[in-house]
Amino acid sequence: MEKITFKVQRYDPDKDKKPHIQVFTIPFKHGMTVLDGLIYIKENVDNTLSFRSSCRMGICGSCGMLINNLPMLACHTPIEELKKDTITVKSLPNFPIVRDLVADLSLLFEKHKSIKPYIMPQDMAEADKPTAEFLQAQGQLEEFVQFAYCVKCGLCMAACPTMATDRHFLGPQPLAQAYRYSADRRDGGAKERFRETDTPHGIWLCHLAGACSEACPKGVDPALAMQLLKRAIISDSLRLRKKPVPPSMAPPQAEKKPKVAVPEFTIKRPGTKS
Amino acid sequence: MRENHLKILQYVTGIGLFFLVGGYHLLLMHLSGGDPESWSSVARRAASAGWLTLYIFILIFGFYHGLHGVRGLILELSLPNRAIKVLNWTIVLGGLAVFGYAIYIPVHAF
């Protein structure tokens, strides 16, 4: 394969009524990713092409796009793996288009914010003036660590069939993160998150299609997190949920060994204290 | 009532329906004896308090399970909160009206 054809969605809100497709044929190089192809088009063919990217290594989650009708990270998708000489690239579905391949992800971030994606301490006095380190066992970390790898790329939201019909549905990313924080032993905000997600447009609209887990480039498995969240909410409602164990605390400050004193200067200079 | 309470009832009625409808078929086709479709069998069941109780339970479980399922489908249409309230009351009142009519027939026959 010497050439590769890109069918790229173009949309300028000032000029176009609806998105259309523009075709570019560019030289192919071994190891090239879809993002490399788009960068080549922008640098050599049409500098008006708009897309979002940053790290180029699947960490930042900026370059989420619909590639050959599947939501993927453009930087994480080698062209050779697609096994086609024509690639169709569109902006992520279930999100409004800003321009060309740039989707407006503000809805994702608003929903993400609504589930309080942070540790809410059980003991506020301890949180204000910590006396010791929170200890977390390996097993406790493993309960949620998989879900902590989320890069907020929005691919799961784009893949979700319920999101496509109900724009009020919280979606896989916020719901998976609601479980991630509620399962953390350091957290005391599970009940608040359960109230946020146990709504008509919340967790119960997930039908376990599994498209979110298939789309996730980081192996987060939001579908599993959502099933675990359902179980946690029902267990909590039936008072079967185990109360979160307060995190084990290290010995209080007074029992700790004193800090090692800063050594004195070996060479005394005039003006320094002895 | 919170959504999870409705969902728990959905699971309970689903499992309940499996046993109630399964038990109904077992009793009707295999354990009651005779031709279940004959006039005398139908009249005997209509006069039985046990059968009436079974009918009422099947109707309660079936109505709840079915109407909650329909509500779940309609909720996916991006409804605003006010429309959800209207939907909830329509389903509750409409469901109760149809349930009342449905229950009238076996009770009247009894």
Image (cartoon, helix red, strand yellow):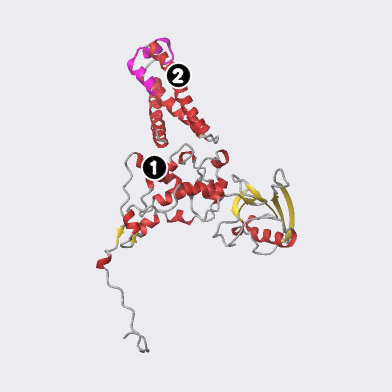
Residue type, numbered disc 1: Ile
Quadrant placement of the N terminus of chain A: bottom right
Q: Chain of mark 1?
A: A
Disc 2 crowd, CA 10 A, few/some/many (<14, 14-19, 20+): few
Q: Is residue A85 left or right of residue A156?
A: right
The local secondary structure at tag 2 comes to: helix
Residue A149 percent across, percent down from the top left: 48, 56
For the magenta stretch, what is the residue range? B36-58
Q: Quadrant of residue A194?
A: top left
Q: Which residue is mark 2?
A: B97
Placement of A205 over or under B71, stated as above or below: below
Disc 1 crowd, CA 10 A, few/some/many (<14, 14-19, 20+): many
Q: Is residue A223 visible?
A: no
Residue A72 percent across, percent down from the top left: 59, 53
Q: Main secondary structure of the magenta part?
A: helix
Q: Is residue A213 left or right of residue A63?
A: left
Q: Is residue B78 left or right of residue B43?
A: right
Look at the image and say whether residue A113 sits in the magenta stretch. no
The local secondary structure at tag 1 comes to: helix
Q: Residue furthest left?
A: A255
For the image, the number of numbered tags is: 2
Q: Chain of mark 2?
A: B
Q: Are marks 2 and 1 in contact (CB under 8 Å)?
A: no
Residue type, numbered disc 2: Ala
Q: Disc 2 to disc 1, how far (Cα)? A: 32 Å
Look at the image and say whether residue B43 sits in the magenta stretch. yes
Q: What residue is at 58 percent from the left and 62 percent from the top? A: A55
Q: Which residue is mark 1?
A: A233
